[in-house]
Image: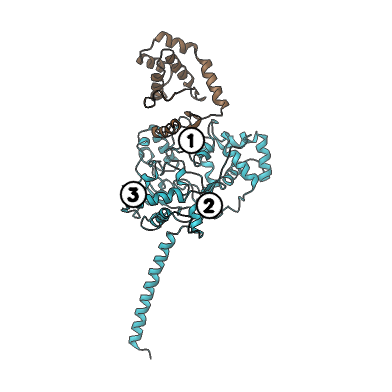
Amino acid sequence: MKEYEGRMRLIVKHYPYKYRDFSHIAAEASLAALDQGRFCEMHEHLLKKSPKLNKANLISYAKELGLDMAKFTDSLNIMKHIKIIERDKKLAIDMDLYNTPTFFINGRKVVGNRPYEYFKKIIEEELK
Amino acid sequence: MINPIVEILNSKSLRLAAAVICLLTILITTASAAHLESLKIPPVPADNPQTPEKIELGKRLFFDRRLSGDGTMSCVTCHDPETGYSDRLAISLSYPTTKNWRNSPSLINTAYNDPLFWDGRAKSLEEQALFPMMSAFEMNQNLDFLEEELKGVPEYVDAFQKVFGREITRQRIAMALASFERTIVSRNAPLDKYLDGDNTALTPEQKKGYEIFTGKGKCAQCHTGANFTNNKFYNIGVPENSVLINDPRVTATMRFTAKVSGYKEYRSLTEDPGRYLVTKDKKDWKAFKTPGLRELALTYPYMHNGVFETIDDVIEFFNRGGGVDKNKTPLLAPLNLSDAEKRAIRAFLLEALKGDVTVVKMPDVP
């Protein structure tokens, strides 16, 4: 994102894996962090720490990021953003997506983790 | 009475003639090993003849995510028609929460391969098709469950009756998939036209690349025949993929595979033993199957662990005489190719082997 600052927009949609215990609450944690302007940091943290993503883990990660803990734990407790998560899941199902991560770069579909150079090539083509 | 001098001469002549015949035999064998052929119709096993209905059934199964345990993966996940019937990843996609350990081979011209997989553990496409479905780190499906699941889909019940005249079994699922996979071919590459007599089919640079491929480059020692593979196994010293070595999930996959393959020291395994897991023969340690080379431009990255991103990386690797391994094949030695020769062989591999690939669109999956 830094390399293409001002030329590219990243939109993240949630598609928690149906058979993972903590995937929904982890998505909630990322949105609770978004409320405090720290989505990207939390998102990175979750990817690094996976699969240690139970509620206690998530709270400790929020502390590490210096979030307002009362607001954060409230969000987790009531699953404040569940409607957004469910909306995103429906979108994925409607689009017949089934693998995470799946990327769309100006409509070009890329499935699975890829090396940076792989994305860079497509981004450069799309920016021309 | 026989003249003793003549007799000695005759004896010498015979020995000389025998030596000449031996030499000729060696030359002919070498020439034949380096022989490339244009692509003909793929072989079909007598017990699984191709029919349009069976191919169509196989295509639907190929796209059907019921074939995976959690319904998130189909054969297409790793063999996507949009990406050269592979997935363009160094290491193939895997069942959620697990990691695979090998590159997904392209299915283009897989009908000509025997045996299959990087380690050759399957003797036919019919045998091959069931492996990924059962694999814990690929599709992770239980085949007894799958049979019952498909029997609950009226369209499949009807289709299996029409195609086989019998009910759904795992063997018939595999037969239908194999029939479909035999239709995924690349034909009419410039090289095919050239080998069939059209001298204008290759550019001068591609022709030069062809000559290096079959001559100085010694590529056709192993990449021979119509599909550019002798279907044999070699340790060429491919470096380990460092991404894999450091991932405990890959270690789990590697040791699990070694364990179910009967490798006693599986707990201490730190590298991919390749063909050895199938044969238990030391000479096969880290040996992998010679891949076919058609449509190379579509099927990157290369090698069993996807460690080479471009064909230039591969050419440099062979130009160095392969990698470093105590069990490396003696067939490889430094080639001392010039930059122009490397460019020529690149043009040959990426352009002259590019033909018309079967186009597959997603069918209606019931």
**What residue occupies the far front of the structure in this picture?**
A128
Q: Is residue B199 visible?
A: yes
Q: Residue at x 50, y 55 (%)?
A: B192
Query: Color used for chain A?
Result: brown
Q: Which mark is residue A43?
A: none
Indicate which disc, 2 or 3, sits on the residue closer to the N terminus. Answer: 2
Nearer mark to the viewer, of 3 and 1? 3
Q: CA distance from mark 3 to mark 1?
A: 33 Å
> Pointer 1 indicates a residue of which chain?
B
Q: Quadrant of residue B249?
A: top left
> Pointer 3 indicates a residue of which chain?
B
Q: In the rendered image, what is the letter of the chain coloured cyan?
A: B
Q: Is residue B280 visible?
A: no
Q: CA distance from mark 2 to mark 3?
A: 31 Å
Q: Which residue is mark 1?
A: B136
Q: Position of residue A13 (x, y in %)?
A: 49, 22
Q: Which residue is mark 3?
A: B322
> Pointer 2 indicates a residue of which chain?
B
Q: Which residue is mark 2?
A: B188
What is the three-letter code of the residue carrying label 3? Gly
Residue B172 versus residue B207 in the image, above or below: above
Q: Position of residue B17 (x, y in %)?
A: 38, 75
